Amino acid sequence: MRMLLIHSDYLEYEVKGKALKKPEEIKEDQKIGKLDEVLAVFMSVEKVDEQNPDEVVDKAIKEIEDVASQVKTKNIFVYPFAHLSSELGSPEIALKILKKIEEKLKEKEYNVKRAPFGYYKAFKLSCKGHPLAELSRTIVPGEAKKE
Ligand SMILES: Nc1ncnc2c1ncn2[C@@H]1O[C@H](CO)[C@@H](NC(=O)[C@@H](N)CO)[C@H]1O
């Protein structure tokens, strides 16, 4: 899994259209979303992650918690983003992994939103620009590589 973590004044999105034949079913109120003072986590799930999805979820949570505590926010935006890797995993497994990450972060009392999966979305982001505001992480089953 490839993650791009951006500490932002806000992230807002608006669904514009289907990017998959069968995108995730969403309710009307999920067509737009916004969080302020947020750690936006753009994630590309990769083929290699399919070897052990649960381990990838746990490692992703650990990295997200680590950065969230350093930038001092409890607001997390889980954002599916198919542009960080040329070896994408299947949409089915990717959605499962992202839903699990959302669920586990909520269990840990984070304020979490997850952008809809399988859609083209317009988004606005306001990166804070401090030294820890733009980070990337690479996670693979069996090891975690920090970039
Ligand atoms: N392996 C994967 N990891 C993360 N997201 C993935 C994925 N496979 C499919 N998606 C989702 O389906 C849309 C079309 O690829 C993706 N849409 C996007 O990435 C938008 N920024 C529009 O391009 C995404 O929602």
Image (cartoon, helix red, strand yellow):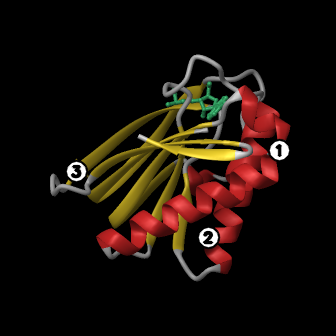
Q: Which residue is drawn at 65% across and 19% down?
A: 87
The residue wearing badge 1 is: 52
The residue wearing badge 3 is: 126
**Label 2 sits on what residue type?**
Leu
Residues at discs 1 and 3 in contact (Cβ within 8 Å): no
Quadrant location of residue 60? Answer: bottom right
Give the image location of residue 109, x and y in percent. 58, 82
| SS state under label 2 | helix
Q: How many labels does the image show?
A: 3
Q: Is residue 79 visible?
A: yes
**Label 3 sits on what residue type?**
Ser
**Assess mark 3: CB under 8 A from ligand 1?**
no
The residue wearing badge 2 is: 105
| SS state under label 3 | strand
| SS state under label 1 | loop
Q: In this view, does 114 lie to the left or right of 32?
A: right
Q: Residue at x 80, y 54 (%)?
A: 54
| Front position in the image: 110 or 117 | 110
| Front position in the image: 79 or 13 | 79
Give the image location of residue 66, x and y in percent. 46, 67
Q: Can residue 26 be seen in this view?
A: no
Q: Residue at x 84, y 37 (%)?
A: 51
